[in-house]
Amino acid sequence: MMLKVGFYLSAVVALFLLFAVSCDMNKAEDVVLLRTDSFSGNTLDHVRRWVIISDEKGRLLDYRETTDAEGVLEFEGDAGDRIIVTELSVASFDQGGTTRLQHNISTYMGVLTGNSYFVADPVNNGGSPYPDPVGKAKLTLLNYTGSSDPYFSIGFSDSYMVFNTWLDYDTWTYEGSTYAGEVELREDPLDIFISTYEGLEPFYTWVRDVNVGDSIVVDVESFQPMIPVTINKPVQNAYIQGQIEPTLGGRGYELSRSDYWRLSDYYEPGEIPVMGYVEGFDTYDVYASSGPVLCCEPHERVTYHKLGSSVPSSIVLPDYALTLQNDNMFNLNYTLAGSYSYKFIFGSVEEENNTLWWFVNAPQGTDFVTPRIPDEILAQYPFLKQDQLPIRSARFTESLDGYSYDDFVRRYFERTPGRTNFEEIRYYKQF
């Protein structure tokens, strides 16, 4: 009898051990969730910075404080297909013996698990530097009657600067219908593009091979109409630029700008100017905005922006509407009328010696999940323990060229400069 009991006990123990080993073999192991050098460098002496990795429910998986000495960082844990990446920094400032803390949090939701992002080699992203002027030439425009102050209603573009900031303003005079003055040339010779409006239509002329010391006379009545680009609603700002350099912000000629109509005698509230362009460029920068760009006042706007080899025959700014049911970012509830590909939300709270700014990026259809901040950090910076974080602004981007949220995340982490060939619509609302 005792032998049988011993046999059965041995069998039970063997089965238990086999089950335990099997469970251990099937237990999920930590994997590399993110590999990047994006968080290395640029940490000032008065700033501390952490990178926090969470799963899609906000549960903490891995984190570390970063320094300038860091290279490629690897974060590990057990997650699904997507993770949340959060960069948290705290800057301390001495204000008359009192320490003020600025807490900044940037959260990227929906980041692909297991990806590697390495910072791109630095290149010039600001276009060609402005060369020093090499001399001056004189321009005289005859038969201009579109404004009492042509400086603001005629566009002179030298391919380096826009809105006439390169003109020698003090030398310009307007008498009768003649507008004349000096221009500073950055090349010798230099081509100059001149544009203006007659009614709602843009007109232009080229002045080619302008040399230092030239005195050139141009009759505005000889200006030619541009290829028209209509807009479906009134705009606060619109322009079309012919690019010499194919990157955003690169060197190019300003072909038309709505301000030259808005600041002319042709302006009428509620009317919509036609934008225009000319052929001869490989890349065009096309932009239109239905509202103003204000810092701290409630407003909203819809923008269209394209950088590419073609110009649309018309610009359509769609209607959007954003309504908040709850403005607390930790329990955000809103309805949006309008389509988008990815979004950006900003919330903040401020007290006398503490400020918290939280920036959130997420793909379409993803609700904001608050990533857990490690207890170690909360103990040192208790202002991060907020129950209410009012939303201050929101931006929704609809990609018209296939550019995805994953592309957006990669471009951020790799610090990719000089974005080219894109087309998008953005809806922005400031609360």
Image: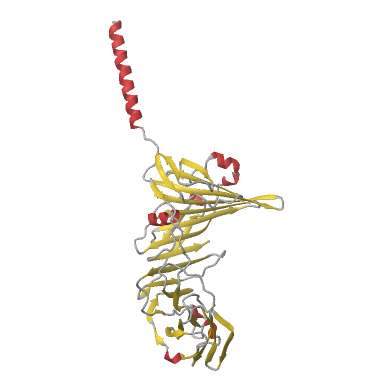
Question: Could you say which quadrant of the image residue 25 lies in?
Answer: top left
Vertical side of 403 occupied by 258: above or below: below
Residue 235 is at least partly visible in this image: no
Of residue 23 and residue 165, the one placed in the foreground of this image is: 165
x and y percent of residue 77 in the render?
A: 42, 39
| Residue shown at the point (38%, 59%) measured from the top left | 341
Point out the residue furthest to the top here. 1
Vertical side of 135 occupied by 406: above or below: above
In the rendered image, the quadrant that contains the N terminus is top left
Point out the residue furthest to the bottom here. 176
Of residue 396 and residue 191, the one placed in the foreground of this image is: 191
| Residue shown at the point (41%, 52%) measured from the top left | 366
Of residue 291 and residue 136, the one placed in the foreground of this image is: 136
Vertical side of 354 occupied by 280: above or below: below
How is the model colour-coded? secondary structure
x and y percent of residue 210 in the render?
A: 47, 85
x and y percent of residue 389 in the render?
A: 54, 51
Vertical side of 28 occupied by 383: above or below: below
Marks counted in the figure total 0
Of residue 22 and residue 182, the one placed in the foreground of this image is: 182
| Residue shown at the point (42%, 91%) measured from the top left | 222
x and y percent of residue 425 in the render?
A: 41, 65
Point out the residue furthest to the right here. 96
244 with respect to 141 (left or right):
left
Residue 135 is at least partly visible in this image: yes
